[in-house]
Image (cartoon, rainbow, N blue to C red):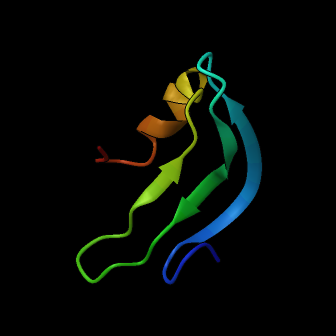
Amino acid sequence: MWGDSIVGFGEYHYKYDSRREGDFLMISFSPRKISTPLYIMNGFDRYNELLEQLGKYR
């Protein structure tokens, strides 16, 4: 659990050119009343084919 309502799996460390860095979830979801947001880390461009199988997303 991250926070009150986010369930996450995996972790990755990020570092910007500005030297800002931190840790975040690789993938997570947050059950809501109207929808279930799914958060995926940056860098999943190579998985476009799999993302299309999710159906409608933004």
Residue 41 in picture, x, y percent from top left: 58, 41
Q: Provide residue 46's location: percent of width, then percent of height.
A: 60, 21
Q: Is residue 41 above or below residue 6?
A: above
Q: Position of residue 5 (x, y in %)?
A: 48, 80
Q: Nearer the viewer, residue 42 or 13?
A: 13
Q: Is residue 45 above or below residue 3?
A: above
Q: Would residue 23 appear left or right of 5 to someone viewing this image?
A: right
Residue at 53%, 23% in the rendered image = 45
Which residue of the protein is positioned furthest toward the front in this rendering?
A: 19
Where residue 44 sits, quadrant-wise, is top right
Question: Which quadrant holds the N terminus?
Answer: bottom right
Q: Position of residue 3 (x, y in %)?
A: 55, 77
Q: Residue at the top extreme?
A: 17
Up-down: is 50 above or below 36? above
Q: Quadrant of the C terminus?
A: top left
Residue shown at 59% from the left, 26% from the top: 43
12 relative to 46, above or below: below
Q: Which residue is at the front of the view, 16 or 42?
A: 16
Front residue of 1 and 58? 1
- The residue at the point 68 percent across, 44 percent down is 22
Q: How many marks?
A: 0
Q: Residue at x 54, y 46 (%)?
A: 40
